[in-house]
């Protein structure tokens, strides 16, 4: 398993994975993904097996002054947090620990950059994944026609960055 930084050349593969996992009303536009990667890709990662992208994590610093990219969760009372826009794995390789590897990589990178909290919105029945990785549900609301759960996680002092699969 190789974890690398997202760049614009990966967006077609990312969209393909996204479309295989989410209903159409939750798909990002090309513009949204391009804008996020251009805004700050320090926290955007891909997972590759045999040079094929099998998953991705798109995240960025939550800044109350930034324009909202896509109804994201902006936490105005905490300036030291990262917002997870999306974490998605190819359906053919789910339940092998790739999502956790990507999340751990984000957690380590965010901690190294001085961030203390990770926030996001859980959709598409993914709340259990986030709970298993230490998130708490803050609230639930309508998110683009689906039920979304605002989630938060305090970065661990002992976070690891393993790329080993289950």
Image: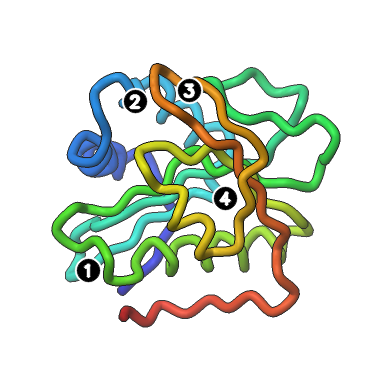
Q: Which residue is mark 1?
A: 49
Residue 83 position within the rendered picture, expressed as x and y whole percent measured from the top left:
61, 41
Labels 3 and 2: the sequence-earlier one:
2
- The quarter holding residue 25 reads top left
Q: Nearer the viewer, mark 1 or mark 2?
A: 2
3 and 1 marks in contact (CB < 8 Å): no
Q: Of discs 4 and 2, which sits in the foreground?
A: 2
Report, in whole angstroms, how far the alpha carbon at label 3 lies from the one at label 2: 9 Å
Reading the image, the residue beneath label 2 is: 26
1 or 2: tag closer to the N-terminus: 2
Question: Does residue 16 appear to the left or right of 11 in the view shown?
Answer: left
Query: Which residue is found at the position 31% from the left and 74% from the top?
Result: 1
The mark tally for this picture is 4
Query: Which residue has dot 4 on it?
Result: 42
How many angstroms separate mark 3 from mark 1 (CA)?
32 Å
| 33 relative to 96 in the view: left or right | right
Residue 147 pos. (x, y %): 45, 28
| Mark 3, other Cα within 10 Å: few <14 / some 14–19 / many ≥20 | some
Coloration of the structure image: rainbow
Q: Position of residue 87 (x, y in %)?
A: 41, 48
Q: Tell which tag, 3 or 4, sits nearer the viewer.
A: 3
* Label 1, label 2: how far apart the Cα atoms are: 26 Å
What's the mark number on residue 149? none
Q: Position of residue 135 (x, y in %)?
A: 61, 55
Q: Where is mark 3, residue-wise?
A: 143
């Amino acid at each position: 398993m190789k974890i690398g930084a997202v760049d614009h050349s990966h967006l077609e593969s990312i969209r393909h994975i996204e479309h295989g996992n989410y209903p159409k009303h939750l798909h990002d536009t090309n513009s949204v993904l391009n804008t996020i990667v251009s805004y700050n890709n320090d926290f955007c990662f891909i997972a590759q097996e045999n040079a094929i992208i099998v998953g991705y994590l798109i995240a960025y610093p939550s800044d109350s002054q930034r324009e909202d990219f896509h109804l994201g969760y902006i936490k105005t009372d905490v300036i030291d947090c990262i917002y997870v826009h999306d974490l998605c794995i190819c359906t053919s390789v789910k339940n092998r620990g790739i999502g956790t590897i990507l999340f751990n990589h984000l957690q380590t990178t965010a901690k190294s950059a001085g961030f203390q909290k990770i926030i996001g919105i859980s959709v598409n029945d993914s709340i259990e994944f986030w709970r298993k990785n230490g998130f708490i549900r803050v609230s639930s609301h309508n998110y683009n026609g689906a039920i979304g759960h605002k989630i938060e996680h305090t970065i661990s002092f002992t976070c690891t960055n393993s790329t080993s699969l289950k």
